[in-house]
Structures are given as structure tokens and as C-alpha cells.
Image (cartoon, grey):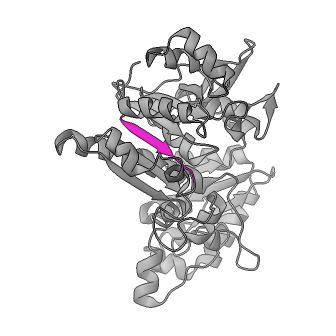
Amino acid sequence: MSGPLAGVKVLEFGTLIAGPFCSRILAEFGAEVVKIEAPGEGDPLRKWRKMYGDTSLWWFVQARNKQSVTVNLKHPEGLEIVRKLVAEADIVVENFRPGVLDKLGLGWDALSAINPGLVMVRLSGFGQTGPMAKQPGFGAIGESMGGLRYVTGYADRPPVKTGISIGDSIAALWGALGALMALRHREVGGGKGQVVDVALYEAVFAMMESLVPEFDVFGFIRERTGNVMPGITPSNTHTTKDGKHLIIGANGDAIFKRLMHAIGRSDLADDPQLASNAGRDVRAIELYGVIDAWVGANDAEIVLRVAAEADVPASRINSVADMFADPQFLARQMLEVAQLPDGKEFRIPGVVPKLSATPGETRWIGPGLGEHTDTVLARLGYPPEEVVRLRGDGVI
């Protein structure tokens, strides 16, 4: 293993998105991640969305750099295997509903007794405490309860979702950050581990900008505003003559002036009422009409070229096909080439963030179910004949 987390051992009891994405981030930067899966079934993500043969393409990305070990958590000998893995782990990542691991004898008190330095990342819909703790909750529920869905969409229509399970992914990022902070505390604070408790709704809620103080101080409730950034003008989506959708963000004072000069509206660039965001926001409808008219009279390439020459932030709203041809994506190696099990090459997302000295990497794609069971058990001291017996008894 290489990378800034080389030597860190992670044990994952995760399925689908939040838990597995959290440990994926750690694995991309060198942590050794052992993923515990149910024999014969595995993570349901293996069968989600587009399949290549009998395996989801998503799986190959979400489980990259991980070792798959199948263990029956309802079997006493399976629990013993897990306890041995816990004893050598630095981090446990789990996204069961609160109470499930405790019923199996794998709750925090039991695991920390085995390994006092353990960091346990617990991702759940509503956190480990509170009246809703044991209720089921997916990313969509977290996005709704945490406020994101309420402000997404148009005012005259019901709330809409983003195109991905963003609540799960945000929670995963908080989980990875919390794990690293807890490891740092363990390093400098006496070697004790702790629980990192991430609730999906709180992970989303933490991203909601000025929502809380604006309501508390002014009673202001942010509503859906479509593609307009509320209170920040101009920043909107526009459609070009050739039918392409672009974002133009000219909400900075100097940037606004440059855009207006570039599109032949120096009168607006030099209008003192429009010199600050507060004045522009009052005249938002007028300004969006001006920009819409200019963009609609030109093809996308011309709009983007003019914006770039004027140093105005602008972008296509990329489809994945656009990304595959985008020189910035290619220059930054954000489309890695990997190989499927049959040798076919395919593209996977590059690793984020970019570390200059210790970058993350893809060492292998998501493994077959139980692919590393024998290797990991051998490392724990199980002789080959014992592994055969355990498999025959349904333990692994």
C-alpha cells in the first residue's frame, strides 16, 4: 500500500452508498479496507443500475481498492472472525440502522473493549440518539428533512431531487473527515478511540448556508427559486441559439461590469445603481432578460469564448458525453482507464482531491464477492483446512 493513509486498517460493515463511499475515500488514499459482506448475497449495490454481466458498473467504482470478505454475522464463529479483525483495525465504518450491531454483540461498547483505540464511524438516517434514531432513513429522507429538497426546484412546482443520491454522499464525506479527525486526536490525545456519529439529515443540514440565521433573525424562509441563486445577481442558466444550456455567474461587482461591456451594454456596466449586488438584485428580472437575449442570439461556442475573453465564469451544463470530450477533465486525469474482469477497458472517475506528494490512486476495481476471504483468514491465522470447514458450515 502507498498513500497518506498507508498502514491504516479499516473494517467496513457497509451497504449501498453512505458507508461504502466513506471507506472508499479512505481506500483511495492508501488505507487497507476489509469489507464484510453476507455470504451468497453481498452488498445490494452489486446489482444496482447498469449491469456488466452480473455485476453493477457502479460497484466496480464504489468498492475499488477494497478487500471483500464474506462472513455470516449471525453465526458465532463468524462473529469471532469479526472480533479478530476489530482487534487489528484502526477504523470501523458501518451504516446499519442503530441497534442492529448491538443486537449482534458488535456495538460500540463491545468493540471498544476489544480495541480501545478504535474509531467507529456510524452513518445512519437520524444519528445514534434522539426519538427518530431507530427509524429507517435513506439519502432522500436526509435531503428532505435537512432542507435541501425544500429549496430545490421552481416556486410554482413541488420540490425536486438532485440527479444523484447527494445526501448519502455528503454524509460519507463528513464520515471520512470525522474519521481522520478522530485518528488525529488518538495520535496526540492519549491513544483513545471514539465514535463519529453522522446523521444523513444533519450532514445535509450542515450544507444549508445561511438558512438558519436568516430565519432566526428575520423570519425569512428560503423558497425554491429555480436556477437563480437567490439574493445574488446575476447567476443563472441561459439557453443559446443552438439549444445548449449554459451557466453564467457574473455576480461579482467587477465581473458584472466586464460581462456588460463584453455584450455591448456599457450603459448597464456604468450604471451606479448596479455597482453592487444589492442594486442588481432589485433589477434582477431586467438583467436576466438582457443576458437571456444576448445568449439566445449566439451559439454556445461564441458565448463561452466571449465570457472567457472577458474573464467571466461560465460553463456548459455538461452531460457525461460532454465530460468525455472536455479538455479540462482530460488534462486533470479525471477519467481513469481501468479493466473489467474480462479485460475490457472502461473509464472510471479519477480520485479527488489531488494531493501533490501523496496522491490517491485506483489499485484495483471492486472485487468479486468473497474474493479476499481466504487471504484475510490466512493472515488471521486460520489454516486452509479450517477455512474449508468454515465455508462448509456456512460461516464464510
Q: Is residue 104 left or right of residue 159?
A: left
Q: Is residue 182 left or right of residue 327?
A: left
* Number of numbered discs: 0
From the viewer's perspective, is residue 92 above or below residue 128? above
Answer with the quarter of the image where residue 138 lies. Answer: bottom right
The residue depicted at 61 percent of the width and 21 percent of the height is: 390
Relative depth, front residue between 341 and 120: 120
Answer with the quarter of the image where residue 380 lies. Answer: top left
- Residue 318 is at least partly visible in this image: yes
Relative depth, front residue between 167 and 185: 185
- Residue 272 is at least partly visible in this image: no
Q: Quadrant of the N terminus?
A: top left
From the viewer's perspective, is residue 91 above or below residue 1? below
Q: Quadrant of the C terminus?
A: top right
Q: Residue 392: x, y in percent?
A: 68, 20
Q: Is residue 396 left or right of residue 175?
A: right
Q: Which residues are magenta?
A: 90-96
Furthest-top residue in this view: 384
Relative depth, front residue between 385 and 254: 385
Q: Residue 348: x, y in percent?
A: 64, 28
Q: Residue 286: x, y in percent?
A: 64, 77
Relative depth, front residue between 29 and 113: 113
Residue 120 in magenta?
Answer: no
